[in-house]
C-alpha cells in the first residue's frame, strides 16, 4: 500500500478523483481500483464523466484534485513513463487522414521510439491481429467505420501496452463490426492486458467486464461484477406492468406479491417490479388482478435496470 | 518570475519533434506537386510582370535595374508566404481533423509537436528560398556568391514566421478567421517591406512603421546577400530577426495546449 491507500500492485487506482472544467465538475470524487489483467468497465450515459476519467488516466487532461495512479505512476509527474505502457482508443477515431493504414501505424510506432525494423515488425503483427493486413495500403478515409475502429485499436497496441484504455470502443458500429471488436478485446484479455472500457451499452458491459462501476453525473453509483450488481441492486428478474399509472405498489398489490418484490421503479406509466422469482410473483398478481397481469412482461433484469433504478433514467436518454 | 513562466512554454526540440517532421514529410510527399506550383506561380508572375514588364519603363532603383532590385525581396516573400500559408491553413486543418490529437493521444507532447512544426516550416522555408534562388540565378539576377548564405537566412525566417502563424492557426475557431491574419498582417507586410521600392527616402514615420515589419529585415539581408552589397547596418537586421524569433517562439505553445489538452 502506498501512503495514499492505493494497493501498489493495482493497474489503475483513483482516490477522491475530481475533474473540473471551469465551474463544471465533470468527475466528482470517484474512487476505484482496477486489478492487473482484469477488464473493468465504466457504464453510464453521455455526460456521466466517463471520458473525462479516461482522459485523466491516459494523461490527456490534468487531474483537478485527488490521487490517480496508473501502474503506480503519477500522470502529473511521470507522464512519459505512463504513456509508454498505456494504449489508448479514444472516443473519436483521430486517425491521420493524409496517410495510409500502414503509415498511420508505422508513424505511431516511431512516435514511441521503436527502431524502424522493430516498428515494421510490430505493424505487421498488429495489422494481422485486427485483420486489416489486406488494407495496408488503403487511405484511412477509404475504410468503413468498423475498419477504422479496428485500426485505432490496432494503433493502441503498437507499444505493447500493459493497460489499454478504450473510450466507447463500439459506439456507432453495426452488430457485426461490434462482435469483431468484442472478439479482439476478449483475445487481449486472455493475453493478460488490463482493459478499461467505457460504454453505454449494457450488453457490452455485461459481456466483457469482470467488474464495472455505474456512473452518472460525475459520480459512481454502484460497483461490482455485472451479474452480482444486478442481483444486489435490483434482483435477478423483473415484471414490467405497462399502463399501470394508477397502481400504487404499496397499497394496490396483494400481500403475497409485496413480499416477493425487492424494489419498484416507475417510468412514465409503466411500473417495474424487481424480484428474484418472476413466476411466483406473476401468480400472486394474477390471483388479485388478472387484467393487470395480462399485459405484463416478465424478463431477467439487466444492468440497464440497475442504472434505471439508481439514476432514475435510462442509459440512452 | 513571469519570464520563467514564459520560458516553460518553450517548444521542445527533441526526438518527438523530429517524428513530427517525419510525419509532415510523409504527408507532403503526397501533394508536393500542387503545393510547389501554388507557391511559385505567383512570385514568378510578379517577377516577370513587374520586374521585366513594368521594369522596362522604370528608371533604375538604387542603381539597379528594377528586376534585380525586386528579385531578392520576392525571394524573401516567397519563403514567408510558403511558411505562413502552410502553417496557418494546414496547421488549422491538422487541428480540425485530429492529426495533432492523434499525436497527443500517443506519446508526443504539445511542446514537441510545436517544435516539430517549427523544424518543418524552417525546412520548407529553405526549400522555397533556394528554389527561387535557382530561378533568379538562371535569369541572371544573382550577383554574388554570398547568395550561398541564403539557406541560413531562410532557416531564421522560417522559424520567425512559424510562431505567429501557428498561434493564429490554433487561435482561429473557423478557417474564415485566418483571413484576418492575411488581410491585416501578411498582405500589408508584403506590400510595405521594401520589396518593390526603396524605403530610405520615405518620411521618418513610414520608415519606422516599415522597420517593425519582419519581412523588411529578411528582404534587406536577402538583397545584401544576392547582390553582394554588405554594410554594417545589416547586423541590426540580424539582431532584430533573432530577438523576434526567440520572443515569438513560445507564443503558439499555450494556444496549442489549450486546444489539445484540458
Image (cartoon, coloured by chain):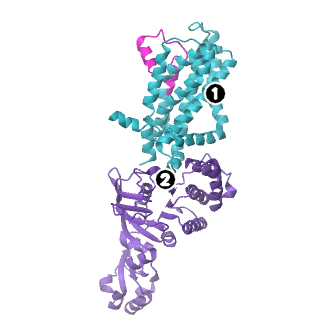
Chain colours: A purple, B cyan
Front one among A85 and B2: A85
Residue A104 rendering spot, x and y as whole percentages: 60, 50
Task: State the quadrant of the N terminus of chain A.
Answer: bottom left
At which x and y percent is residue B197?
54, 13
Q: Residue B40 carries which label?
A: 1
In terms of secondary structure, where does tag 1 sit? helix
Any part of residue A266 in sight: yes
Q: Is residue A17 above or below residue B244?
A: below
Residue B207 among those drawn in magenta: yes
Quarter residue A270 falls in = bottom left
In the rendered image, is residue A60 in sight? no
**Quarter that holds the C terminus of chain A:** bottom left
Same chain for mark 1 and mark 2? The answer is: no
Q: Is residue A243 above or below residue A74?
A: below
Residue at 66% from the left image edge and 31% from the top image edge: B37
Residue B19: quadrant of the picture: top right
Which chain does the numbered disc 1 sit on?
B
Instruction: Give the magenta range.
Output: B186-212
Looking at the image, residue A184 sits to the left or right of residue A75; the answer is right
The furthest residue to the bottom: A287
In this view, the residue farthest toward the left is A251
Residue A83: mark: 2
Chain of the residue under label 2: A
Give the camera-side residue of A114 and B101. Answer: A114
Q: Residues within 10 Å of mark 1 (few under 14, many from 20)?
A: some
Rendered location of residue B121, percent (x, y): 55, 33
Amino acid at each position: 500500500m502506498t501512503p495514499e491507500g492505493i494497493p501498489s500492485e493495482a493497474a489503475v487506482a483513483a482516490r477522491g478523483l475530481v475533474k473540473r472544467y471551469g465551474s463544471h465538475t465533470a468527475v466528482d470524487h470517484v474512487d476505484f481500483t482496477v486489478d492487473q489483467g482484469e477488464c473493468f468497465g465504466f457504464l453510464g450515459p453521455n455526460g456521466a464523466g466517463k471520458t473525462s476519467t479516461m482522459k485523466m488516466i491516459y494523461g490527456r487532461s490534468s487531474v483537478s484534485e485527488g490521487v490517480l495512479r496508473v501502474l503506480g505512476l503519477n500522470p502529473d509527474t511521470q507522464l512519459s513513463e505512463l504513456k509508454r505502457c498505456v494504449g489508448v482508443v479514444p472516443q473519436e477515431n483521430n486517425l491521420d487522414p493524409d496517410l495510409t493504414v500502414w503509415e498511420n501505424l508505422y508513424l505511431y510506432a516511431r512516435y514511441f521510439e521503436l527502431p524502424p525494423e522493430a516498428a515494421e515488425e510490430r505493424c505487421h503483427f498488429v495489422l494481422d491481429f485486427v485483420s486489416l493486413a489486406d488494407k495496408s495500403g488503403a487511405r484511412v478515409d477509404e475504410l468503413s467505420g468498423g475498419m477504422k475502429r479496428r485500426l485505432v485499436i490496432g494503433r493502441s497496441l503498437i507499444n505493447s501496452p500493459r493497460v489499454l484504455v478504450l473510450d466507447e470502443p463500439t459506439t456507432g458500429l453495426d452488430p457485426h463490426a461490434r462482435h469483431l471488436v468484442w472478439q479482439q478485446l476478449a483475445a487481449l484479455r486472455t493475453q493478460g492486458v488490463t482493459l478499461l472500457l467505457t460504454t453505454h451499452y449494457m450488453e457490452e458491459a455485461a459481456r466483457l467486464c469482470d467488474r464495472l462501476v455505474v456512473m452518472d453525473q460525475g459520480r459512481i453509483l454502484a460497483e461490482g461484477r455485472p451479474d452480482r450488481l444486478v442481483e444486489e441492486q435490483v434482483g435477478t428478474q423483473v415484471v414490467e406492468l405497462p399502463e399501470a399509472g394508477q397502481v400504487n405498489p404499496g397499497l394496490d398489490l396483494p400481500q403475497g406479491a409485496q413480499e416477493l418484490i425487492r424494489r419498484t421503479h416507475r417510468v412514465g406509466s409503466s411500473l417495474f417490479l424487481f424480484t428474484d422469482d418472476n413466476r411466483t410473483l406473476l401468480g400472486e398478481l394474477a390471483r388479485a388482478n388478472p387484467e393487470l397481469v395480462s399485459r405484463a412482461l416478465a424478463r431477467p433484469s439487466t444492468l440497464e435496470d440497475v442504472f434505471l433504478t439508481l439514476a432514475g433514467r435510462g442509459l440512452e436518454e | 518570475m513571469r519570464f520563467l513562466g514564459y520560458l516553460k512554454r518553450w517548444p521542445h526540440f527533441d526526438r518527438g519533434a523530429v517524428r513530427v517532421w517525419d510525419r509532415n514529410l510523409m504527408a507532403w510527399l503526397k501533394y508536393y506537386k500542387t503545393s510547389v506550383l501554388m507557391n511559385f506561380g505567383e512570385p514568378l508572375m510578379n517577377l516577370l510582370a513587374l520586374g521585366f514588364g513594368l521594369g522596362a519603363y522604370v528608371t533604375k532603383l538604387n542603381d539597379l535595374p528594377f528586376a534585380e532590385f525586386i528579385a531578392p525581396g520576392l525571394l524573401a516573400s516567397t519563403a514567408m508566404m510558403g511558411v505562413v500559408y502552410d502553417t496557418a491553413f494546414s496547421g488549422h486543418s491538422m487541428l480540425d481533423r485530429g492529426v495533432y490529437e492523434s499525436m497527443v493521444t500517443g506519446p508526443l507532447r504539445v511542446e514537441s509537436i510545436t517544435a516539430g512544426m517549427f523544424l518543418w516550416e524552417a525546412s520548407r522555408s529553405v526549400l522555397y528560398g533556394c528554389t527561387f534562388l535557382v530561378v533568379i540565378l538562371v535569369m541572371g539576377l544573382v550577383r554574388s556568391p554570398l547568395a550561398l548564405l541564403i539557406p541560413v537566412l531562410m532557416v531564421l525566417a522560417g522559424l520567425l514566421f512559424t510562431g505567429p502563424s501557428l498561434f493564429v492557426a490554433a487561435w482561429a475557431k473557423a478557417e474564415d478567421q485566418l483571413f484576418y491574419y492575411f488581410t491585416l498582417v501578411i498582405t500589408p507586410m508584403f506590400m510595405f517591406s521594401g520589396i518593390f521600392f526603396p524605403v530610405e527616402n520615405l518620411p521618418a514615420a513610414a520608415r519606422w512603421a516599415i522597420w517593425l515589419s519582419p519581412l523588411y529585415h529578411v528582404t534587406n539581408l536577402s538583397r545584401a546577400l544576392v547582390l553582394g552589397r554588405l554594410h554594417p547596418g545589416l547586423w541590426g537586421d540580424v539582431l532584430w530577426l533573432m530577438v523576434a524569433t526567440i520572443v515569438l517562439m513560445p507564443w503558439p505553445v499555450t494556444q496549442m495546449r489549450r486546444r489539445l489538452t484540458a
